[in-house]
Every structure is written in structure tokens, then in C-alpha cells.
């Protein structure tokens, strides 16, 4: 079992930045990819960004490209999401997830463990 704890969410004005962190604990041995997803009220959970075990491959949703950066520190079992140029439409609960594969995925159903989420609110 893997436990994930997100942090770094909060309230920010449009154009501002936030850095989310997700620390994994528990049965963290093995090579696993990680991803960030988000869910706004009344909407389905959507893909944000993902990173392979090595960090050599990263993927982003089109609307996040150029604004968000995903990275990881395997020594700390932590993945990060740097979010710049935030927009009100980025307001959502952000979740990190672990996939029991070294290869990242953009599909929600391919992830095995999920965190509780952290709220990001962008005011206009």
C-alpha cells in the first residue's frame, strides 16, 4: 500500500504561482510513475501532468503546457507541480497519483493509488 499526501494548495490571484508537492510513503519500493490530476466542481477528474520513474519523460494536458512543470525527487519519494500564470479556470482540487509502472500515463484509470487532494483557488 502507498500513501500519498499533497500540500501546497491555496488561494492565489490570477497570474500568480503555486508549487504543489506530493510525498509518497509506505510500500514505495519499485519503480513507479506519478501524475497530477484535478477536479473542478461539477466536472470529471482530468489529467494535468505525469512523469516517468526516471523523470526523463513528462506529459502535460494541452491547456497546461508552458505554464505547469512536473518534476520528482526519487530520494524523497516526492513529486512536484510548479504552476505559473494561473487562471481562474485552474481552480480545482488537485490530486497526485501513483501508477505501478515506470511508464507514465495520461489516463486516470491506469493509476493505482491516489492522494486526498489539495484545493487550488485562483481569483480573478
Image (cartoon, rainbow, N blue to C red):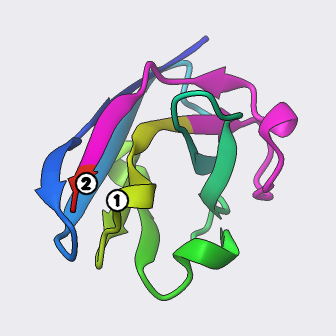
Which residue has dot 1 on it?
A: 88
Q: Is residue 105 above or below residue 22?
A: below
Q: Residue 39, relative to residue 73: is it above or below?
A: above
Residue 37 falls within the magenta-colored stretch: no
Taking the spot 19% from the left edge, 68% from the top edge, the residue there is 17
- Work out whether mark 1 precedes mark 2 in sequence or the reverse, and give the earlier one: 1
- Split into 4 quadrants, where in the image is the N terminus? top right
Q: Is residue 83 above or below residue 41?
A: below
Q: Residues within 10 Å of mark 2 (few under 14, many from 20)?
A: many
Q: Position of residue 16 (x, y in %)?
A: 16, 71
Who is closer to the viewer here, 3 or 47?
47
Front residue of 6 and 76: 6
Is 100 magenta? The answer is: yes
Looking at the image, residue 82 sits to the left or right of residue 1; the answer is left
* Tag 1–tag 2 contact (CB < 8 Å): yes
Q: Quadrant of the C terminus?
A: bottom left
Residue 96 located left or right of residue 99: left
Q: Which residues are magenta?
A: 97-121
Q: Which residue is mark 2?
A: 122
Amino acid at each position: 500500500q502507498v500513501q500519498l499526501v499533497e500540500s501546497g494548495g491555496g488561494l492565489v490571484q490570477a497570474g500568480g504561482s503555486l508549487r504543489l508537492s506530493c510525498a509518497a510513503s509506505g510500500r514505495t519500493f519499485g519503480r513507479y510513475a506519478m501524475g497530477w490530476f484535478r477536479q473542478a466542481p461539477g466536472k470529471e477528474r482530468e489529467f494535468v501532468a505525469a512523469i516517468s520513474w526516471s523523470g526523463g519523460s513528462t506529459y502535460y494536458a494541452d491547456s497546461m503546457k508552458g505554464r505547469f512543470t512536473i518534476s520528482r525527487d526519487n530520494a524523497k519519494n516526492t513529486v512536484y507541480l510548479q504552476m505559473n500564470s494561473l487562471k481562474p479556470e485552474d481552480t480545482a482540487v488537485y490530486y497526485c497519483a501513483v501508477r505501478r509502472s515506470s511508464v507514465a500515463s495520461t489516463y486516470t484509470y491506469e493509476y493505482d493509488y491516489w492522494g486526498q487532494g489539495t484545493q487550488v483557488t485562483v481569483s480573478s
